[in-house]
Amino acid sequence: MLTALKSLSSDRSSAMSAEGTVTLVFHGYDDDPRELEAIPEVREWFANLFKAWPYWPFFASRIDQTVPLGLALLLSGATVAGEPGMAGWNRY
């Protein structure tokens, strides 16, 4: 996967044509009741990806939950319930 992502940022033309096209999807956690940002191995995987390829914000899709999920995976803390339909963030 990292090779494919790096190809997106290999030159200006590739980068510009791929801006906003990457969506984060994690398979195998559908039956886990925790939010993805509460699963240590998911957080660790994304932190390692970010260290190897820090350009994900430029390429992240802005029409789905990729940007908020990516931030939640990188920041220390956890989501907390707010008003109905709302969520907040509690820093550790």
Image: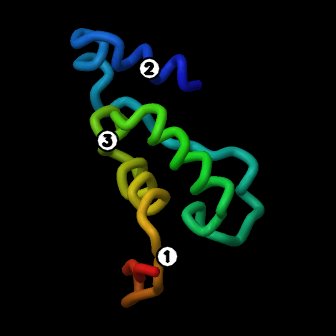
Quick check: marks 2 and 1 in contact, CB under 8 Å? no
- Residue 7, placed above or below residue 39: above
Q: CA distance from mark 1 to mark 3?
A: 20 Å
Q: CA distance from mark 2 to mark 1?
A: 30 Å
Mark 1, residue position: 78
Quick check: marks 2 and 3 in contact, CB under 8 Å? no
Q: Secondary structure at mark 1?
A: strand
Label 1: few (<14), some (14–19) or many (≥20) C-alpha neighbours in 10 Å: some
* Residue found 54% across the figure and 25% down from its top: 2
x then y, percent, for residue 81: 46, 86
- Residues 85 and 44: in front is 44
Mark 2, residue position: 6
Q: In this image, 81 relative to 14: left or right?
A: right
Q: Earlier in the sequence, mark 1 or mark 3?
A: 3
x then y, percent, for residue 84: 41, 87
- Residue 36, placed above or below residue 47: below
* Residue found 47% across the figure and 23% down from its top: 5
Residue 2, which numbered label?
A: none
Mark 3, residue position: 57
Q: Secondary structure at mark 2?
A: helix
